Image (cartoon, rainbow, N blue to C red):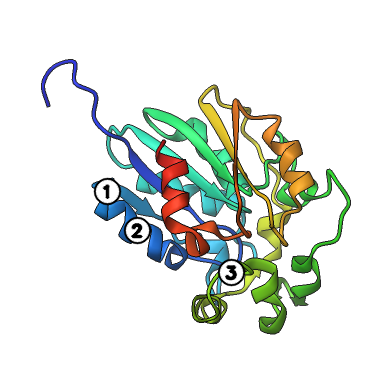
Amino acid sequence: MKDGAVSSPTYILVHGAWSGAWCWRDVGVELDRRGVTWRAVDLPSSRNGADPATGLAEDTAAVAALANDEGPYVLVAHSYGGAVVSEVASRIPNLQRCIYVAALLPIPRESATDASRHIRVRTLLDDAIEVEGEFLRLKPDLASDALFNHCTPSTAKWAVEQLSTQTIASFRSHRKSDNDMTETIYIRCTDDHAVDPELQQLFSEECDFALTLESDHSPFLSHPSDFCDVILN
């Protein structure tokens, strides 16, 4: 790199609860086609067989481990991943911005659960959740409408088959970091059956910029090209 040249950022993709790096399948293809460098994390709290105590600290450590060079970086957070990115942002070197996609944004000392209750509204996702000891699981027959209602039937079926358990500890872990000064962008998804659009509007008002996608909760699978347009531009 020549002196003074600005390198293109690496996009670190942080999935939501019950999910994994697999959810970026179509976005990864699109980013590769556009010549964008990206990395995707598998959050420890979303792994089948995880230690029940696995929470925000372990998830943030996994994201920080991907930022293993001088950057620059852009963090992209979906759903529960918003809590992870808000916690870890101050630890990422040369961070350009944080992009939140239908994400939960707990303020310092709040948990993801606390953030989800800023507006009390029941969603299809709430109906899909069932408790198994110290884990949460989604009922497959309800998860599709809650998360993938704009996806093709084949994509929705495939995605539901990938869903894992999620530790309750991850939702109850309290954010310890203060707000970072990095630029923040919030992407609201208008037909979201998991994080209510009214709640998303509230979170978006805490960010520097807000954008809108005519999408379900999972635009990276239902509208991957449009999703990339938004996060890149």
How far is the residue under mark 1 from the one under mark 2?
Answer: 10 Å
Q: Which residue in the structure is indicated by mark 1?
A: 34
Vertical placement of residue 132 versus 115, above or below: below
**Position of residue 51 in the picture relative to residue 61 (left or right):** right
Residue 40 location, quadrant = bottom left
Q: Using the rendered view, name the quadrant where residue 202 is placed.
A: top right
Q: Quadrant of the C terminus?
A: top left
Farthest residue, direction right: 120
Position of 159 compared to 69: left or right? Answer: right
Mark 1–mark 3 distance (CA, rounded to whole Å):
38 Å
Q: Nearer the viewer, residue 85 or 185?
A: 185
**Circles 3 and 2: CB atoms closer than 8 Å:** no
**Residue count near mark 2 (Cα–Cα under 10 Å), binned few <14, some 14–19, many ≥20:** many
What is the count of numbered marks?
3
> Is residue 15 found left or right of 216 in the rendered image?
left
Q: What's the residue at 71%, 38% (across, down)? A: 203
Q: What element carries label 3?
A: loop
Q: Say what secondary structure mark 1 lies in.
A: loop
Q: Nearer the viewer, mark 1 or mark 2?
A: 1
Task: Provide residue 84's location: percent of width, then percent of height.
Answer: 57, 47
Going from N to C along the chain, the mark reached first, 1 or 3, is 1
Q: Do the residues labelled 1 and 3 touch (CB within 8 Å)?
A: no
Could you tell me residue 147's position as x and y percent?
Answer: 64, 67
Amino acid type of the residue tagged 3 in the rendering: Asp
Q: Name the residue under label 2.
A: 28
Mark 3 lies on residue: 51
Query: Residue flagged by tag 2: what amino acid is it?
Result: Gly
Does any portion of residue 166 appear in the rendered image?
A: yes
